[in-house]
C-alpha cells in the first residue's frame, strides 16, 4: 500500500477531529451518542499510520538503535513532557485543591517516567504515549530477530496480543507488586483502553509491506491539521479541563476526578451504613456518571441493591465490576452471594471457586461456598468447606455454627458435640442462634430415643439462652422419660414460671405428677394445658385412653 505524506496527514487530521469531538461530547455530556466510539477509531488511525510510517522509514532489519530511539524520544517524549509540565503548572494555578489527593505525587512521577495507567493519567492522554512507545520498542526488538519480514510482522500481529491475552493476570500481578500505589482497578481500566488497539500498529506495518494499491486523499485544511495532530492530541484534554474549571465551575478534569468523586463516595458509604440504600444508589449513580469505569462503585451499587432485595439488579452490578476487573475477588464473592439468594447454588460455587483462586485460604470464601454446597444438598462438601473456614480463621463463629448444623442434618451427633467443645468465646448476639441449634440437636436425639444425650443438648442450649421457657420444657420432658421425675418437675416449674401460657409444660408436668401418684395435681395441670391449647386432651380424655375409672 502506498500512502503519500499529504494523505497520511489528512487521515491524522480526521483522527484528531474524531478524538477531540468525542472527548468534548463525553466531557460536556452532549446527547450525541453515535459519536461516542469515534475516539477509538481516531486512535486506531494514529497507531495504524505509525506502524505504516515506521516500516517505510526503517524497514525491519539493520535499524540503528541509537538514532531510532533518539528520534522517537525527540518527537514523542519531549513534547509530552513539555505539555505535561505546562499542564501541571496550570493545575497549580487554577486547581490547587487537586494536589491535596495523596496519590498525586506518585502519579506525577510515574507520568514523567512514562508509566501511565488510567485513571492515574494526569494529562488524560499519557496512556497513548506509553502505548505507542511500547510498540516502538517491540518493533526494534522484533527487527533484531533472525526471521524474514513477514514472520516478524506476524509475530507482532499475533504473538504480542496473544502474550498479553494469555498472561494479562500475571502481568497485572507483577505490576501491582512493583507499583503498590497503583490498584488493580487502575491496571484493568488501562487494559480495557489498550485492548481495542492491539492490532492497529502491526496492521499498519503489514499494509506498508503488502499490496500495490495507492491511497491518495487531498484536502489541504485537514492535511495541515494533521501535521500538528500529535500536539493537538497532547493539548486538548488539558484545555477541556481548564475550560470546565473556569467556565463551568466543576472539578472534573481529564481522568482526575477523585476530588469530585470522593464527596459522593463518602456520602454513599455513610448512607449504606445507616441503611439508606436508595440514597446511596443516587450517590453511586453520580459517581458513575463522572467515571463510568469505577469498579468499586459498581460493587457498592450491587451491595445496595442486594440489601434492597433486588438480587437481579445486584447481579448486574457485580457483573459490570468483574467485566472492568477480572481479578476483583470481592466482586466475585458478592456475586456468588447474589446467586445464592436467587438459588443458583451451582453458579455461586463457581464464583467462590474464583475467589479462592485469587485469595487462597479465604475463610469467608470457604464459608460461603460451604453454604452453597448445603443448597445443592452436598452436606459432606459443605462440612469440608466449613472445616477449611475454621482452619483459616479459628474464631469464625458462623463457620462453627453451620458446620454443626450440617453435622446435625446427617446425624453426626458426636461430630457436633466436638464442635460444641471447640467453640471459641462467642458474642452474646449469637446466643439465640446457638441455643436454637442445640435445641434442634436435643430434639433429634429425643426423636431417636437418646434421651440422656438429649438432656445434655438441652443443657447446652440453656447455657446460651438461660431464660428460655421452651427449652426448659423440653429438658423437663426428657428427664421425665428417664425416670428423673423430681428433676423433670423442677424444670417444668421453671418453664411455667418463665411463660405461664406454655401449654406443653403444664401437660408434661401433669403427666409427671401422674407417674408420682399426685392425681389431683396431674388433673389440674392437664386441664390447664387443655384450656391453653384445646388440641391437647383434658384429664378425662386421658383417663379414658388409659382405661381408668372414677
Image (cartoon, rainbow, N blue to C red):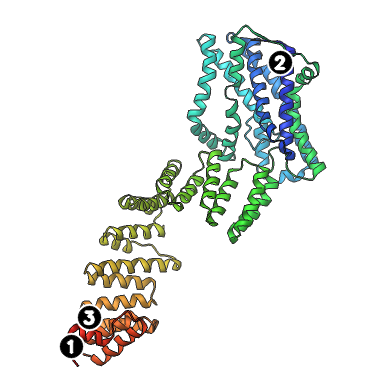
Nearest to viewer (mark 1 / mark 3): 1
Residue lying furthest right in this view?
247
Q: Is residue 462 above or below residue 260?
A: below
Tell me the CA gap for discs 1 and 2. 112 Å
Earlier-in-chain disc, 1 versus 3? 3
Closer to us: 194 or 2: 2
**Residue 504: x percent and y percent?**
32, 79
Question: Residue beneath label 2, please?
Answer: 8
Q: Is residue 114 above or below residue 548?
A: above
Quadrant containing the N terminus in the rendered view: top right
Secondary structure beneath label 1: loop
Closer to us: 476 or 456: 476
Earlier-in-chain disc, 1 versus 2? 2
Contact, mark 1 vs mark 2 (Cβ under 8 Å): no
Question: Residue beneath label 1, please?
Answer: 548
Earlier-in-chain disc, 3 versus 2? 2
Question: Residue beneath label 3, please?
Answer: 484
Nearest to viewer (mark 1 / mark 2): 1
Amino acid at each position: 500500500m502506498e500512502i503519500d505524506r499529504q494523505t497520511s496527514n489528512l487521515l491524522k487530521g480526521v483522527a484528531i477531529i474524531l478524538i477531540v469531538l468525542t472527548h468534548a461530547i463525553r466531557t460536556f455530556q452532549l446527547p450525541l451518542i453515535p459519536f461516542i466510539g469515534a475516539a477509538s477509531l481516531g486512535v486506531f488511525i494514529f497507531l495504524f499510520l505509525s506502524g505504516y510510517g515506521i516500516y517505510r522509514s526503517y524497514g525491519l532489519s539493520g535499524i540503528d538503535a541509537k538514532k531510532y530511539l533518539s528520534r522517537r524520544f525527540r518527537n514523542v517524549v519531549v513534547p509530552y513532557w513539555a505539555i505535561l509540565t505546562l499542564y501541571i503548572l496550570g493545575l497549580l494555578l487554577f486547581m490547587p485543591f487537586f494536589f491535596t489527593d495523596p496519590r498525586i505525587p506518585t502519579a506525577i512521577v510515574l507520568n514523567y517516567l512514562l508509566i501511565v495507567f488510567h485513571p492515574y493519567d494526569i494529562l488524560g492522554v499519557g496512556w497513548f504515549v506509553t502505548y505507542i512507545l511500547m510498540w516502538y520498542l517491540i518493533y526494534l526488538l522484533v527487527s533484531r530477530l533472525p526471521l524474514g519480514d513477514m514472520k516478524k510482522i506476524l509475530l507482532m500481529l499475533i504473538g504480542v496480543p496473544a502474550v498479553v491475552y494469555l498472561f494479562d493476570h500475571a502481568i497485572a500481578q507483577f505490576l501491582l507488586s512493583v507499583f503498590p500505589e497503583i490498584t488493580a482497578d487502575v491496571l484493568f481500566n488501562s487494559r480495557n483502553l489498550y485492548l481495542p488497539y492491539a492490532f492497529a500498529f502491526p496492521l499498519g506495518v503489514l499494509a506498508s509491506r503488502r499490496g500495490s494499491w495507492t491511497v491518495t486523499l487531498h484536502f489541504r485544511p485537514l492535511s495541515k491539521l494533521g501535521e500538528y495532530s500529535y500536539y493537538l492530541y497532547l493539548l486538548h484534554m488539558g484545555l477541556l479541563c481548564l475550560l470546565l474549571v473556569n467556565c463551568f465551575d466543576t472539578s472534573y478534569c481529564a481522568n482526575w476526578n477523585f476530588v469530585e468523586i470522593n464527596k459522593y463516595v463518602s456520602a454513599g458509604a455513610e448512607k449504606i451504613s445507616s441503611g439508606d440504600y436508595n440514597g446511596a444508589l443516587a450517590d453511586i449513580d453520580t459517581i458513575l456518571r463522572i467515571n463510568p469505569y469505577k469498579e468499586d462503585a459498581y460493587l457498592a451499587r450491587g451491595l445496595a441493591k442486594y440489601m434492597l432485595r433486588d438480587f437481579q439488579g445486584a447481579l448486574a452490578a457485580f457483573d459490570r465490576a468483574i467485566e472492568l476487573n477480572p481479578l476483583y475477588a470481592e466482586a466475585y464473592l458478592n456475586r456468588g452471594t447474589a446467586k445464592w439468594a436467587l438459588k443458583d447454588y451451582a453458579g455461586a460455587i463457581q464464583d467462590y471457586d474464583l475467589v479462592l483462586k485469587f485469595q487462597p485460604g479465604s475463610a469467608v470464601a470457604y464459608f460461603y461456598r460451604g453454604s452453597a454446597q448445603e443448597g445443592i444438598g452436598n452436606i459432606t462438601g459443605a462440612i469440608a468447606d466449613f472445616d477449611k473456614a475454621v482452619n483459616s480463621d479459628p474464631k469464625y463463629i458462623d463457620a462453627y455454627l453451620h458446620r454443626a448444623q450440617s453435622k446435625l442434618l446427617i446425624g453426626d451427633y458426636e461430630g457436633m458435640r466436638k464442635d460444641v467443645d471447640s467453640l471459641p468465646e462467642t458474642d452474646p448476639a449469637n446466643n439465640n442462634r446457638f441455643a436454637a441449634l442445640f435445641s434442634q440437636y436435643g430434639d433429634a436425639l429425643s426423636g431417636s430415643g437418646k434421651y440422656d444425650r438429649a438432656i445434655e443438648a438441652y443443657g447446652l442450649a440453656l447455657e446460651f439462652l438461660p431464660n428460655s421457657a421452651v427449652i426448659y420444657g423440653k429438658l423437663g420432658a426428657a428427664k421425665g422419660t428417664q425416670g428423673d421425675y423430681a428433676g423433670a418437675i423442677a424444670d417444668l416449674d421453671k418453664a411455667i414460671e418463665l411463660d405461664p401460657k406454655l401449654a406443653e409444660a403444664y401437660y408434661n408436668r401433669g403427666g409427671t405428677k401422674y407417674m408420682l401418684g399426685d392425681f389431683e395435681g396431674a388433673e389440674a395441670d392437664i386441664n390447664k394445658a387443655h384450656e391453653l391449647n384445646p388440641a391437647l386432651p383434658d384429664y378425662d380424655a386421658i383417663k379414658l385412653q388409659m382405661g381408668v375409672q372414677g
